[in-house]
Amino acid sequence: MKNILLIGGSYGIGLAIAKELQYENKVYIASRTNEAINDMNVTHIPFDAATDTLDTSLLPEVIDGFIYCPGSINLRPFRGLKPEAFESDLQINFISMIKALQTVLPNLLVANQSSVVLFSSVAAGMGMPFHTSVAAAKGAIEGFAKALAAEYAPKIRVNVIAPSLTDTPLAEKFLSNEEKKEKSAQRHPLKRVGTPEDMAKTARFLLSEDSSWISGQIFHVDGGMSTLLVNQ
């Protein structure tokens, strides 16, 4: 049974990952809230990624898997974005992830071979209007992940999941009714919106021994959006 640490696992994609992992692993969730996970087979650690330092005394000595889930969807025209908006997106998506990862790096290094899973966005790899801030933050994650994977191979594997718009609380304002959901679905070659479970199953694979020869990769779980041109 592996020890898996989720930073932000109490709702959305993180919660779906926790549900996917809870019976075959020892799952630790470091998050601000725990209402949705009270009845689950997980250990909760109160933690705000934006402000707190993770208390490693509450974690096992060996951590086999690390997943960072907090993120943002800040879609606005570039001309209306102040530098502070870019700093805020970079902070929650990237800087806070680095702090948490550095805190538990010793725990990851004592594992036989640990796995780190990070989240990017389809917008980091393809130009999309109004995505300058989030694309910049997620692009930082992709470049960082490849460099980290090289630096710590073969001891730590590092991979990234890059979703398109996924039906989570974070994306609620973009999918708040059936018309919006249908329009979003039609923009994807596979004609549906992504679900938290789509991401959770990919994360489970990347944490498992089935992916033990995979590192430094970006997995585009995006309904084909980043590579398929079918809507003409």
Image: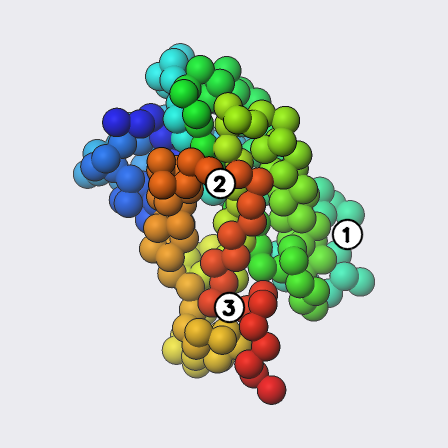
SS at mark 2 in the image: loop
Mark 2 sits on what residue?
214
- The residue lying toward the viewer, choosing from 170 and 189, is 189
Q: Where is residue 34 in the image (x, y as percent from the top left)?
A: 32, 37
User: Which mark is nearer the camera, 2 or 1?
Assistant: 2
Mark 1 sits on what residue?
82
Whether residue 145 is visible? yes
Q: Is residue 62 left or right of residue 96?
A: left
Residue at image point 39% right, 26% down:
64
Residue at image point 48% right, 80% down:
186
Q: How far apart are marks 2 and 3 (CA)?
A: 21 Å
SS at mark 3 in the image: loop
Q: Earlier in the sequence, mark 3 or mark 1?
A: 1
Q: Is residue 62 left or right of residue 129?
A: left
Residue at image point 67% right, 42% down:
143
Residue at image point 80% right, 62% down:
79
Are the residues flagged by discs 3 and 1 in contact, CB closer than 8 Å?
A: no
Q: Which mark is residue 4?
A: none
